[in-house]
Structure formats: C-alpha cells, structure tokens
Amino acid sequence: MGFLEWATSPWGQSVPIHIAWFLIWVAVIAGLLFLIVHATWLRYFAKPKEFADDASSKVSAQLPKRVPRHSLVARLFHWIMAASMLTLLFTAFLPKVGIQFPWVTYHWIAGAVLTVAIVFHIVHASFWLDFWSIWPDKTDLEDARRRVLRFVGMSAPPPRKFAKYPLENKLFHGVIILCGLSVIVTGVFMMFRVRTVFFPRNPYLFSDMTWGLMYVLHGLAGVGLIALIMMHVYFGLRPEKLAITKSMIFGWMDRDFYLQEHDPKRWMVETSSSSSSLPSTSNRVEGRGLTDAG
Amino acid sequence: MAVIRDVMAAFELYQPSSVADAQKLLEQHGPDAWVLAGGLDSLDWLKDRIRKPKAVVDLSGIAELRGVRTTNDGNDGIEIGAMTTLTEVVNHPVIKQKYGLLAESAELVASPQIRNQGTIGGNVSQDTRCWYYRGGWPCYRAGGNICYADTPEGRNREHAILHADRCVAVNPSDSAPALIALDAKFVVRTPKGERVVDAEDYFIGPDIDITRLHILQPGDLLTAIRIPSTWARAQFYFEKVRDRNVWDFPLMNVASAMVTSGDRIERIRIAVNGAAARPLRLKAVEDAVRGQPRNTATGEMAGRLAVQGAVPLQFNAYKIPLMRNLVKRAVSGVEEATWAS
C-alpha cells in the first residue's frame, strides 16, 4: 500500500498521478486523535496557566471594556477564507469517499475565491496591518523554552503573557501558509487542465512527471488541511478560547480576557478617546507596534 | 498500458446459476470482481490485459436473467432480463409490435453475430470506446489526471460535444436512447436490496463519476429492464449514424417516441447518444415541441434547441449539425433510410 498512485505514461515513464485516497482517512483520524489527546490532557493533567508579572494592573484602568482585536476587513477576510476553504475540502474529498455530485466547478470557483482572498490578505497584512504580529519573535521562542522546561519539571521562570497572538497561533498560521500556498499555486496550474473562464486549456503546460508531482503536492496539502481545519475548529470551540473566537465575529475581546492572557507591552491596544481614560498625549496603552493584525 | 494481446491474465471464473449466488459472489469480491455478460466488451479489456480482475462472474448460466415477460404491475408492460440477447430482443413479437423503437435500435447494433452473443444488459452497461482509455493510457477515466483526447493534437472525432467535464468520452450504446425514449426502468440488485431507476438516471457523466458510465457500484447487478406500456405503439423514430453501415459504433444516434393528436405533438420523449458521456434525454426539446404541429419548422426549432451549449473539440465540430439534423428529423418525422435485416 503506497502513499502515491503511479501510472505508466504513453512514453513508458512511470509517473505519480495523485496521492492514495486512504490518506484522507489518515488525516481525519490524525485530527481526531489530536483532539482527543489534547482534550484529555487539558481536562485531567494540565496545570493552570502561569505567567510572569507584567504591566496589566497598571494599564487596566486605561483600557476600554471591549478591547479591539480584528478590524471588519480582517474579519471579512477570515470568514470568506473559511467558507471557501470548507467548500474546497468538501468538494474535493466527499466524492472520494462515495458522496457523488458535480464537484469540479464548485471546487475551482471556491479556489478562485480563496486565491483572491489570500492575495488581498497578503497586501492588506503587509501594508495596513502589523505584519510581524503573526510571526514568532525572540520572546515567543524564549517563552516556549521556558514552558517546555517547566512542563518536564525543570526549573525555569514563568513565561510572559502573549503578544496579540500566542506562539501556537503563529505556528498554526505558518503551517496554514505552507499548505494554503501549496494548494493555491498547484491549484491555479491545475485549472489549465479543466475548462474555466480564466485560461484556455493547456494540458501540455508541463511534463507528465511535473503534472504528477503537482497533483501529489495538491493532494498532500489538501489532506493536511483536513487535519489542520479540524484542529482550528476544535480550538475555536474550546471554552477557554471562546473569547478569541468571538473576537473574530465581533472584532473585540473582553478587557478581563485581554489582561489575563496578553501583555500590553507586547500587544499595544489603540483606544478611542471616548472610551478610555488615557492621558491626553496618547491614546495608546504602552507597548510597541501598531494594533490590529490579520 | 496494453503490452500483451490475446492472452488473458489469470482469474478465478465463477459461473453462478442464480441471481442470489451471483450477487453473493459480487459482494464477496467487491472491486476485484468483473461481471461477464455477453463478453463482447469484457474480452477486449481482459485480452488487452488492461483490466485484470481477480474474479470473473459469468452470468450466462442464470436462467432468470434471460427472456422477455409481461409485467403484472398493472401497467401492462414488459420486463426484459438483462442477459436477453439483442437478437432475442429484435425478434420478440411483443417488442416488435408494441416497442418497435427498441427492436430497431437493437437491430442496428454491430453485426448479427455480435447481436447473437451480446445482451441488452451488456449493451447499456458497456464502457466507452475512447481509444486512449481503451489503450490503457492513464487518463482521467482510468484514474489518472489528464484527458488525452481533449488536447490540441488529440484524435477526438468521435468524442463529446456536450457535458464534457475533463473527460470527453461518449457512451456507445444504441439501445440506451431507445430505452430512455420508452421511459424504461432499470432494475438493479444492490447489497442493500433492489433498486429501480429511470433509464436516464442509470447513466452518469464524468461530472458525477469520471470512472464509470453508469450507476453500478462494485457488488451491484443489473437484472432486468422494465418498459411500461405508456409508449406502446407510439410513433417511433430511430436513426443511427456511423462510419460504415454494419459492425460499427454510433457516431451519434437519436430515438424518439411520440403521440400526436391531429397534426399536433401531444406527448414526446426524445434522447440522443454519442453526444456526451451519457445518453441525453432532451427535456428542453420535449417541452418546446409539445403542442406544436409536427412539421419541418418545429423540427428545425427542436434541432437548434438541442445543440445549445454544444462545445466542439478539434475534430468533431461536424457533430453539432449532425445532432441538429437528427433531432430535426426525429421530431418532424421525415422518413430516412433504415437498416432492416
């Protein structure tokens, strides 16, 4: 049982044609196992979160009750991406597990929507948002080291509170970038093999081997996304993360949650003068960088 | 790829004597089983070593799958066992008298020898004749990721002009459009029980499943075809266009059943094959011509409507006027030369 399906091209060359479809079930089972293990660990074994002291108590009075987290544009992007991603996964894999319907047109339309949304997000995040807020920084890595040491029972100072995004969030975003860009780039080329409104068909754009590898990469990234999306939805529904999920709907999070989890020095919150009691010289709580992010 | 011809790969041969036994075998072997009816499509695949099933279930010994009987479900129709040969269909008196459309379409299948061996079930369930696919090339229909026929250099004179979705192969059956026009029902035994589907729903296009031309899954068995009396003794039209007048698959065919009142078309069912991966019932045409006079003008309108949305490939643009004219003739009733043995 191989991970790839191979075929012999008309020229006698052995070429990969796509992934073996049992990998769909491997991804689903892997996602479920992660969910079960994580939920069990949190329920029975995890210790309460402990953070190093920070400036929260000093700034709490200056903060509005609702701390702004995601702009309307950022939220719209997220939900458009979610809808297109779910459409892509369902149209790609349901027919492979026996639920048959005319899926190709829905699939490439959803892919086109996702591509446009991602291009928009790259431009928006690069020029209008705090681009670096979603990338791991030195503090994240140092705190990760502290958390690992404490997890294995060694002595280490408590980690600091998070910036706008916890390290796990940032790593997830990184993996999504890898898988997302893989399916998008390969998917755009694969559209040359079907009839769309975008390009004339050209099935000979690449060699059989290159096409085969492209289909394999598309499939591997696709099944990877099954597990990743399962995890993302799971975290979005976990009680302790609901404040973050709600912020992706309403755009803000409670001040208490912000103070409990986030370090005002690492995630500077911009407040409106009407809702804050900040000094007149500034309407920002101390810290570095701009607020908002993708 | 086809490497060795005329020497089949080894397989276990099963020759059940009842439908129940056949179905048990098909369930037992699942995707590894191959259903053998008349063998005319199957032996090509097996001898070319493109299909190498582990088990072949030969249905020829199952008496209950043979013969034509009247149905007792109140509609005074007939039931044709899936293993009934095309010659039996052609010569059956009830079919000739009441459902001449089917007799005519079956009589135009291939050659007398093939009709003596080929079955009605096999004729509607046969695979496409796309030579890239049948040559063992790793195309979409064979599980790959390309259609070799739908390329700038692809030989696609016989391929689809409608409803192509990555694959452009067409269904080669002559009896299928006639059965659709007669509003036939296909009886399918599945592991979950018996299922009866309309003839037009028995066939599927590549948009639904690119590897099959019909709904049969591993473990399923087509056992019979029921024709209700709804269209018995209606005015029928069948025309098949092919490169040579015997022993050839259709480039395209058309079948219609019509009931007129005076010079008006009261009811009509019309289907074409060879235009897409499944025989197409032309519902839009039926709706448009119902209540219209049966004349050349209505036929021309029907023909134009039938080809709407057609997309020709490099070498099959001729199929658009061909389909337009076939539908026109089927509706307007112009008598064309027909083959009679």
Image: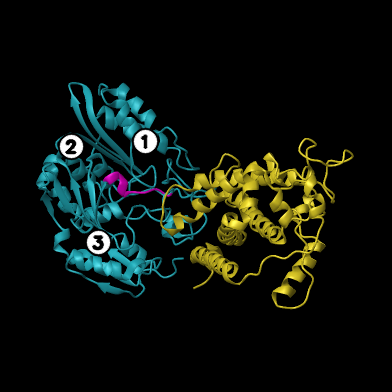
Precedes in sequence: disc 1 or disc 3: 3
Depth order, front residue of B114/B139: B139
Report the Cα–Cα distance between label 1 and label 3: 31 Å
Depth order, front residue of B291/B322: B291
The answer to whether residue A133 is above or below residue A149 is above
Residue at image location 49% in from the left, 60% down from the top: B138
The answer to whether residue B312 is above or below residue A193 is above
Q: Which residues are magenta?
A: B199-206
Q: Nearer the viewer, mark 1 or mark 3?
A: 3
Precedes in sequence: disc 2 or disc 1: 2
Residue A165 in view in this figure: no
- Identify the chain drawn in yellow: A
Residue type marked 3:
Ala
Circle 3 — which element? Answer: loop
Q: Which residue is mark 2?
A: B231
Q: Which residue is mark 3?
A: B37
Q: Nearer the viewer, mark 2 or mark 3?
A: 2
Q: Are marks 2 and 3 on the same chain?
A: yes
Tell me which chain the residue with mark 1 is part of: B
Q: Which of the 4 quarters of the picture holds residue B256? A: top left
Report the Cα–Cα distance between label 2 and label 3: 28 Å
Q: Which residue is mark 1?
A: B323
Residue at image location 75% in from the left, 64% down from the top: A51
- Whether residue B203 appears in magenta in the rendering, the answer is yes
